[in-house]
C-alpha cells in the first residue's frame, strides 16, 4: 500500500443500493478514483471529521494490481493481480448531497 499510485473504484454496481439512494441505475457500473491517502494501515484509526453524524459504509473486496498494462485479455488478467485486501468505503452523505445540489458531482447516467 505504501507504493500505491491510485485507487480505482467501481460505482453503482449494486442496483438495489442505487435505487435505495434515489440514484439512476446505469446500464453498466462507472469507474472513479480515490486518493492513495485514503489508505489506512493495519491497526490505524479512522478519523471522522467533527460535525458529521451520518456516515454510510460498505465493506468491499479490494483487488491489488501488481503489474500494469493496457488492453489486457481476459485470459491474462489474473497475471496482473498480486493480492486482495479488505476495503471499507465510507461516505458522508450530507457532503455528497450538497455537492450534487451544487452540480459538482456528475450523475452516473451522465458518465456513460
Image: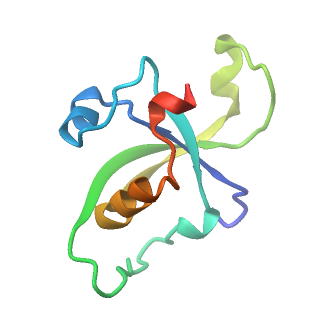
Q: Quadrant of residue 47?
A: bottom left
- 64 or 37: which is nearer to us? 37
Determine whether, in the image, residue 54 is placed left or right of residue 30.
left
Q: Nearer the viewer, residue 75 or 53?
A: 53
Query: From the viewer's perspective, is residue 11 above or below residue 51?
Result: above
Question: How many marks on residues?
Answer: 0
Q: Residue at x 28, y 27 (%)?
A: 15
User: Looking at this rendering, what residue extends furthest in the front direction?
Assistant: 102
Which residue is at the far bottom? 50
Quarter the C terminus occupies? top right
Give me the residue at 26% from left, 59% from top. 56
Query: Residue at coordinates 32% horizontally, 88% vertically from top-left?
Result: 50
Q: How is the image coloured?
A: rainbow
On screen, residue 9 above or below 44:
above
Q: Is residue 46 above or below residue 87?
A: below
The image quadrant where one finds the N terminus is bottom right
Q: Quadrant of residue 99?
A: bottom left
Residue 96 in the image, given as x and y percentages of width and height? 38, 59
Q: Nearer the viewer, residue 43 or 93?
A: 93
> In the displayed structure, does residue 24 sit left or right of residue 70?
left
Q: Position of residue 82 (x, y in %)?
A: 64, 41
Q: Nearer the viewer, residue 29 or 1?
A: 29
Residue 65 left/right relative to 91: right
- Which residue appears at 52% of the width and 31% of the height? 110
Amino acid at each position: 500500500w505504501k507504493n500505491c499510485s491510485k485507487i480505482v473504484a467501481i460505482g453503482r454496481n449494486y442496483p438495489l443500493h442505487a435505487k435505495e439512494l434515489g440514484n439512476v441505475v446505469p446500464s453498466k457500473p462507472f469507474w472513479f478514483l480515490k486518493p492513495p491517502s485514503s489508505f489506512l494501515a493495519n491497526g490505524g484509526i479512522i478519523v471522522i471529521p467533527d460535525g458529521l453524524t451520518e456516515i454510510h459504509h460498505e465493506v468491499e473486496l479490494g483487488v491489488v494490481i501488481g503489474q500494469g498494462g493496457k488492453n489486457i485479455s481476459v485470459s491474462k488478467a489474473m497475471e496482473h493481480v498480486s493480492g486482495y485486501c479488505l476495503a471499507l468505503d465510507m461516505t458522508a452523505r450530507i457532503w455528497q448531497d450538497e455537492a450534487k445540489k451544487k452540480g459538482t458531482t456528475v450523475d452516473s447516467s451522465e458518465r456513460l
